[in-house]
């Protein structure tokens, strides 16, 4: 039986503690108009494979050229800089769960609806998910499913928790997540994999690899934000 979160306590709390922007602390919305304006949307041109911003459209960019990628494409709504950083921190570390709906709206505005049969999500580490009150990637996937009219399935589970990815190099990230995911049910031919932030692609790649091994013909990664290298 799927767990359905009851938002009513949050609405009651808003009456006692009025909302403030999670990025700047001002205004009366979770994302104020100024911070929303300052989010750097990744609308193109982009690398067709990994979704990195490029000077002109390319099939592979210097960030992903020569790498074996298990996903067919990756797309993100905004660059992981400016207001995006405190917004994601508020979402993941401060328990501001209503931000999932805000982020899903931004993703739906920037990223075209994928031609897939189902939305899956990167499973969170159980201990960290418990501390956060849920898995941000799952919350984003369910909000996107509602936006796009796509079913959401729990296709992957998490094995033994590794070290947090924060602060690790690309190669360390790849080693850290290797073997971290297990398929819980056979995926359809084409699936989208939802996560919060794309940094090096190591987590998305490891999760997509397991879906491909279990029978998915193509996996498309969708995240709210991504690191942009200069």
Image (cartoon, rainbow, N blue to C red):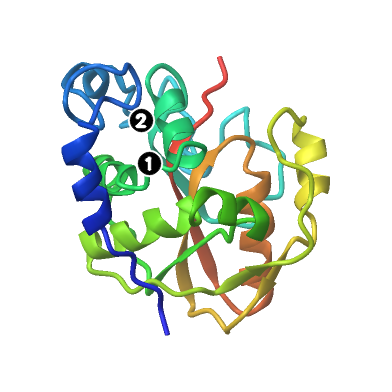
Above-or-below relation of 77 to 140: above
Which one is in front in this view, the residue at disc 2 or the one at disc 1? 1
Please report the residue visible at 44 percent of the width from the left and 75 percent of the height from the top.
Answer: 153
Q: Is mark 1 on a helix, strand or loop?
A: loop
Please tell me which residue lies in front, 113 or 68: 113
Where residue 110 sits, quadrant-wise, is top left
Which dot marks residue 41? none
Q: Is mark 2 on a helix, strand or loop?
A: loop
On the question of residue 31 being in view, the answer is: yes
Q: Which of marks 2 and 1 is nearer the N terminus?
A: 2
Please tell me which residue lies in front, 34 or 227: 34
Q: Residue at label 2?
A: 42
Please tell me which residue lies in front, 132 or 70: 132
Q: Residue at label 1?
A: 96
Task: Left or right? Give the position of 116 relative to 157.
Answer: left
Question: Percent position (x, y) of residue 158?
Answer: 68, 65
Please report the residue visible at 77 percent of the width from the left and 45 percent of the height from the top.
Answer: 174
Please tell me which residue lies in front, 69 or 178: 178
Where residue 79 sits, quadrant-wise, is top left
Above-or-below relation of 41 to 146: above
């Amino acid at each position: 039986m799927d767990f359905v979160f009851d938002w009513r306590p949050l609405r009651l709390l808003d009456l006692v503690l009025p909302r403030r922007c999670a990025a700047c602390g001002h205004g009366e919305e979770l994302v104020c108009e100024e911070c929303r304006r300052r989010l750097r949307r990744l609308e193109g041109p982009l690398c067709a494979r990994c979704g990195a911003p490029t000077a002109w459209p390319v099939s592979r960019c210097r960030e992903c050229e020569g790498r074996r990628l298990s996903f067919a494409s990756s797309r993100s709504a905004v660059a992981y800089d400016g207001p995006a950083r405190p917004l994601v921190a508020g979402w993941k570390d401060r328990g501001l769960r209503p931000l999932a709906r805000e982020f899903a709206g931004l993703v739906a505005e920037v990223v075209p609806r994928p031609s897939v049969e189902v939305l899956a999500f990167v499973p969170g580490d159980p201990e960290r998910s418990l501390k956060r009150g849920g898995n941000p990637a799952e919350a984003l996937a369910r909000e996107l499913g509602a936006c796009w009219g796509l079913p959401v399935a729990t296709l992957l589970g998490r094995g033994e928790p590794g070290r947090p990815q924060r602060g690790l190099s690309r190669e360390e990230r790849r080693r850290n997540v290797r073997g971290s995911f297990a398929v819980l049910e056979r995926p359809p031919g084409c699936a989208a994999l939802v996560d919060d932030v794309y940094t090096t692609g190591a987590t998305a790649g490891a999760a997509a690899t397991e879906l491909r091994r279990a029978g998915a013909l193509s996996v498309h990664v969708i995240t709210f934000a991504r690191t942009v290298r200069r």
